Amino acid sequence: MILALDQMSRYFQATLTRVWSPIGQTPRVRISPQRDCLHFYGALDIRCGREIAVTAPEQTAAVTTDFLRLLLLLFPTQPILLLLDRAPWHHGPALTALLTENERLELLYFPPACPQLNPQEHVWERTRDAISHNHTYPQFDALVSDFDNYLNETPFETNFMQVYGPPIDTAIFE
């Protein structure tokens, strides 16, 4: 398994994007004084586009370790190569202990300041475009639920392996 991991924060405030509207009918976006926030951990299988996403109350090394345990449970026999950024919560004693206990889990960090390399970033962007840009949700729970459902039910295509993977010798398949 090759998985790309990342986290994002989802606030109740609508993120804005440009939209088309009929002349004279200015779109309205509800602004809420609520500061509700929830974090999402996501891992994208870059070969088939399957997303595994869960909500989390915070972004810490302990929560990251718990998410990696979940991935190990979901893929009980496969070796896992996990691609991730260098966020501070991707390091720490708990994570080191988990890696020591599970030889089939290997981490590969992206270079610093290169979020565009992580396919999971594109999953967040596509989900925000589909669910939360210019949203009119009256309740934060409904927004979170739709966001979560979209993440876990939508296949996300990526060309990561074609761009960054090893070249494939097509002659061996003929």
Image (spheres, helix red, strand yellow):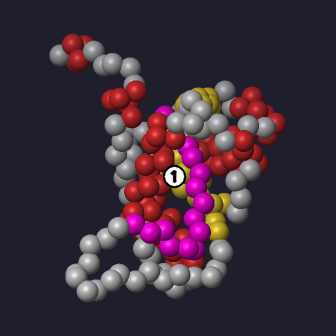
| Residue in the image at 43% along x and 60% along y | 127
Q: Position of residue 160 (x, y in %)?
A: 39, 34
**Residue at the extreme front:** 24
Between 63 and 14, the residue placed more toward the observer is 14
**Residue range of the region highlighted in magenta in the rendering:** 1-17
Between 59 and 173, the residue placed more toward the observer is 59
**Image quarter of the C terminus:** top left
In which quadrant of the rendered view does residue 84 lie? top right
| For residue 39, side relative to residue 61 (left or right) | left
Between 139 and 3, the residue placed more toward the observer is 139
Residue 48 in the image: above or below residue 133: above
Residue 51 in the image: above or below residue 46: below
- Hey, what amino acid is under mark 1? Ile
| For residue 170, side relative to residue 6 (left or right) | left
| Residue in the image at 23% along x and 17% along y | 170
| Residue in the image at 52% along x and 36% along y | 114
Q: Position of residue 124 (x, y in %)?
A: 47, 55
Q: Is residue 35 magenta?
A: no
| Residue in the image at 46% along x and 40% along y | 116
Task: Return the residue at label 1.
Answer: 52
- The answer to whether residue 104 is seen in the rendering is no
Neighbour tally class for label 1: few under 14, some 14-19, many 20 plus, Cα within 10 Å: many
Q: Position of residue 161 (x, y in %)?
A: 38, 31
